[in-house]
Image (cartoon, rainbow, N blue to C red):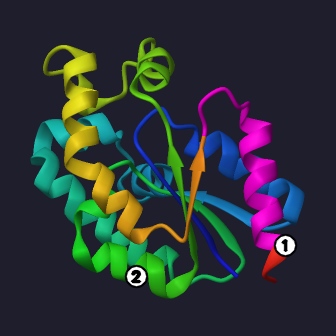
Amino acid sequence: MNIFIVGPMGSGKSTVGKIIANELFLSFLDTDDEIEKSTGVSIDWIFDLEGEEGFRKRESAILGDLAEKNSIVLSTGGGIILSDANRDLLSARGSVFYLDTPIDIQLERTSKDQDRPLLKEGDPAKILTKLHKERESLYQSVADHIVETASKSSQEVANEIIKLVKSYG
């Protein structure tokens, strides 16, 4: 049983994933962390050197490795759903939970974080709105469950996912 968490930056994927993994005694992994471990450099540095395309290739390769594992909770990067192959792999290897998060909450959560390459090129509100329009249907298409995060703590979101997981397995 694998639990894959998708959603936009600032949706709480890593925080929620760690809670779920801890409570269900599963291994927690994060695609961005694994990319940084395998390369020895930051995501920011990869974007600067290789651009988004280079980063996406690395992200897909890491996903391929991680999806082969069992009994994991995987927090994915916000753009992992851009690739058809990635969406197919997520669907085939586990249950996918989409953390649907309002843009104002994403803005608040990402405002102090300097390690968001896609937010460095202009007004974060406009960028997050644009990304939402481009990606929303992809998140929905890959999700087995859509979890609304507005006005919920990370623990409440995790509890909702745990309840769903326990209901079918």
Q: Is residue 2 shown in magenta?
A: no
Is 71 placed above or below 58 here? below
The secondary structure that dominates the magenta segment is helix
Amino acid type, residue under disc 2 in the picture: Leu
Indicate left or right for 124 with 31 as reference: left
Is 117 situated above or below 112?
Answer: below
Mark 1 or 2: in front is 1
Is 59 on the left or on the right of 104, as rendered? left
Task: Check disc 2 and report the residue beneath it.
Answer: 89
Specify whether 167 is left or right of 77.
right
User: In the depicted view, which residue is nearer to us: 55 or 143?
Assistant: 143
Foreground residue among 10 and 142: 142
Residue marked by disc 1? 166
Q: Are marks 1 and 2 in contact (CB under 8 Å)?
A: no
User: Front-most of 88 and 55?
Assistant: 88
Callout 1: few (<14), some (14-19), or many (20+) C-alpha neighbours within 10 Å?
few
Q: Start and end of the magenta stretch?
A: 149-166
Real-space Cα separation, disc 1 to disc 2, in angstroms: 22 Å
Secondary structure category for the residue under label 1: helix
**Image position of 115 (left or right of 69):** left
Give the x, y percent position of residue 38.
41, 60
Q: What is the x, y in percent for residue 89?
A: 40, 82
Quadrant containing the C terminus is bottom right
Q: Which mark is residue 58?
A: none
Q: Earlier in the sequence, mark 1 or mark 2?
A: 2
Mark 2 crowd level (few <14, some 14–19, many ≥20, 10 Å Cα): some
Q: Residue at x 73, y 58 (%)?
A: 161
